[in-house]
Amino acid sequence: MHRCLKMLPLLSLMWSCGGLAAAPVFEIEIRDHLFFPSEFTVPADQKVKLIVYNRDSTPEEFESYELNREKVIMGGAKSVIFIGPLKPGIYPFFGEFNPKTAQGRVIAE
């Protein structure tokens, strides 16, 4: 088979993905075992990129049963979590290591 024909499926995949829009980005921080902001609104029915910065020196876990996400973020580090697409509604999340203080919610509209 000619070399150009072998590359056709790969080029086709690259071309079809080129028109996709990037996911909206939202940033939150963990400071003093709290999420800032503790509540934010994302577009419904759209995938979202969430960047979580842990400003504390200790690890924290971003966890949400409703979002089906669980991610440990080491102290002084950041992590990327993709959520959605979400139906309109309220989706709580919490810090597994400090569940009484580290609480928040995502509102999809």
Image (cartoon, rainbow, N blue to C red):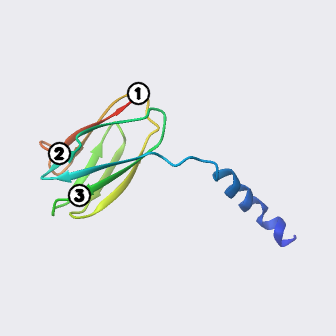
Residue beneath disc 1? 88
Q: Residue at x 22, y 64 (%)?
A: 76
- Tell me the distance, in whole angstroms, between the alpha carbons under discs 3 and 2: 12 Å
- Tell me the distance, in whole angstroms, between the alpha carbons under discs 3 and 1: 28 Å
| Image position of 78 with respect to 103: above or below | below
| Image position of 35 with respect to 9: above or below | above
Location of the N terminus (image quadrant):
bottom right
Q: Residues within 10 Å of mark 3 (few under 14, many from 20)?
A: many
Residue beneath disc 2? 102
**Residue in front for this viewpoint, 64 or 50:** 50
Instruction: Residue type at mark 1: give it.
Output: Pro
The single residue placed furthest to the bottom in the displayed view is 3
Q: Residue at x 24, y 62 (%)?
A: 74
Say which mark, if any, is on residue 54: 3
Secondary structure of the residue carrying tag 1 is loop
Residue 108, x across and y down, in percent: 38, 32
Secondary structure of the residue carrying tag 2 is loop
First in sequence, mark 3 or 1: give its number.
Answer: 3
Secondary structure of the residue carrying tag 3 is strand
